[in-house]
């Protein structure tokens, strides 16, 4: 054969393959989600997320120092609120001595350079397990947005570098930005969950925080997975309202959305490699059906290749070990 072009030339050895690789994972890509619980010296494995833990604040601080030493530079905090503190208004979410506020302060004190991002939504604090205030069977928008804005200010006051609203209410980015400005928090960023879909893959996360909705589902605020154009509408509006970073969530079944968003905005795009995506790899690996390490690297590389500048992932530590 006389071929003009032989594509296999660029694949024939590890050296040439690494030279022409288009997507390289780095510790700088990852955001590490952390689940924080009350108490001391607590480290509870999450049943549906083997190898991932909910930790008390003392252990969380140790973990954060370890993450920093590994080259990981940002954490995304979620807290498990005690049942007796839950109500329909998210009262505990605004408590300056609440677990989230204490956690932010403790982490920033122990590891000042670590970027601390906080989840902003009512579900961990809601007696109904919904992301907003419930009236009848409705999740009401505008009253919820007011609480989310106050919650963001409270996180900023505790020292959060970024607030990360994950609730999908309308108008919350503008309200949060205005509230931060009014309170002179001009350096606090907003990472908006802009295109967040109503997904069955959040199941293990809701186990981790005991935050499953008590009635109904989240389809009146989270997006329908049938839709793509709507993701662009949501994301462009969030950028216009003041989001510094936008997010697509989940990641794996939504790689087309990540690419479409990446091509449409002028801000960094993050993707959330969520709990159910973690659980699937863990379960298949446990059965001996998949090579876990290879599955982790292939998955994270694919998410980055699709257009994610940042990836929130429970595999961050594994990935750093595997790429170093
Ligand atoms: C809730 C929230 C959820 C996740 C992050 N923030 C779950 C939900 O919307 O029910 C999911 C994260 C994951 O599954 O890893 N505001």
Image: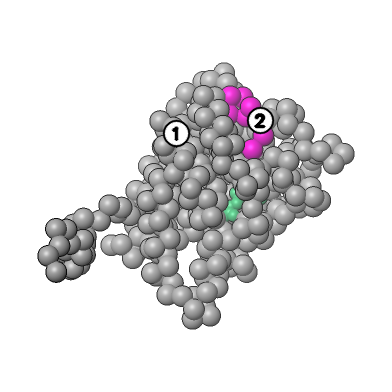
Circle 1 sits in a helix, a strand or a loop, which is it?
A: loop
Where does residue 214 sit, x and y in percent of width and height? 79, 52
Which span is picked out in magenta?
A: 168-175
Please tell me which residue lies in front, 90 or 157: 90
Q: Earlier in the sequence, mark 1 or mark 2?
A: 2
The image quadrant that residue 195 belongs to is top right
Residue shown at 44% from the left, 72% from the top: 292
Q: Quadrant of the C terminus?
A: bottom left
Q: Does residue 38 appear anywhere in the picture? A: no
Q: Is residue 89 magenta?
A: no
Which numbered tag is attached to residue 151?
Answer: none
Q: Residue furthest right?
A: 136
Q: Residue furthest left?
A: 2
Q: Which residue is mark 1?
A: 264
Q: Residue furthest bottom?
A: 288
Circle 2 sits in a helix, a strand or a loop, which is it?
A: loop
Residue shown at 42% from the left, 46% from the top: 308
Which numbered tag is attached to residue 170?
Answer: 2
Gap between marks 1 and 2 measured at Cα: 20 Å
Residue shown at 40% from the left, 45% from the top: 307
174 relative to 196, above or below:
above
Residue shown at 55% from the left, 67% from the top: 280
């Amino acid at each position: 054969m006389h071929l003009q072009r032989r594509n296999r030339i660029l694949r024939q050895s590890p050296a040439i393959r690494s030279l022409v690789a288009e997507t390289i994972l780095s510790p700088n890509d990852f955001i590490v989600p952390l689940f924080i619980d009350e108490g001391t010296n607590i480290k509870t494995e999450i049943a549906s997320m083997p190898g991932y833990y909910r930790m008390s604040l003392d252990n969380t601080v140790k973990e954060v120092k370890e993450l920093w030493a590994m080259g990981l530079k940002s954490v995304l905090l979620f807290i498990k609120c005690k049942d007796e503190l839950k109500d329909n208004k998210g009262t505990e979410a605004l408590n300056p001595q609440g677990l989230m506020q204490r956690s932010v302060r403790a982490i920033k004190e122990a590891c000042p350079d670590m970027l601390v991002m906080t989840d902003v939504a009512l579900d961990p604090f809601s007696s109904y397990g919904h992301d907003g205030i419930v009236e009848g069977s409705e999740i009401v928008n505008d009253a919820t947005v007011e609480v989310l804005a106050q919650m963001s200010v409270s996180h900023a006051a505790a020292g959060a570098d970024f607030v990360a609203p994950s609730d999908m209410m309308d108008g919350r980015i503008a309200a949060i930005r205005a509230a931060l400005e009014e309170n002179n928090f001009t350096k606090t960023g907003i990472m908006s969950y802009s295109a967040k879909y109503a997904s069955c893959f959040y199941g293990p996360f809701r186990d981790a925080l005991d935050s499953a909705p008590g009635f109904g589902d989240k389809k009146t605020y989270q997006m329908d997975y049938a839709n793509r154009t709507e993701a662009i509408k949501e994301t462009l509006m969030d950028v216009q309202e003041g989001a510094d970073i936008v997010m697509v969530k989940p990641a794996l079944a939504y790689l087309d959305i990540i690419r479409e968003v990446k091509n449409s905005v002028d801000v960094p795009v993050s993707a959330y490699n969520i709990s159910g995506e973690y659980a699937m790899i863990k379960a298949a690996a446990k059965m001996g059906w998949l090579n876990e390490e290879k599955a982790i690297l292939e998955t994270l590389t694919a998410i980055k290749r699709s257009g994610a500048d940042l990836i929130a992932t429970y595999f961050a530590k594994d990935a750093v070990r595997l790429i170093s």
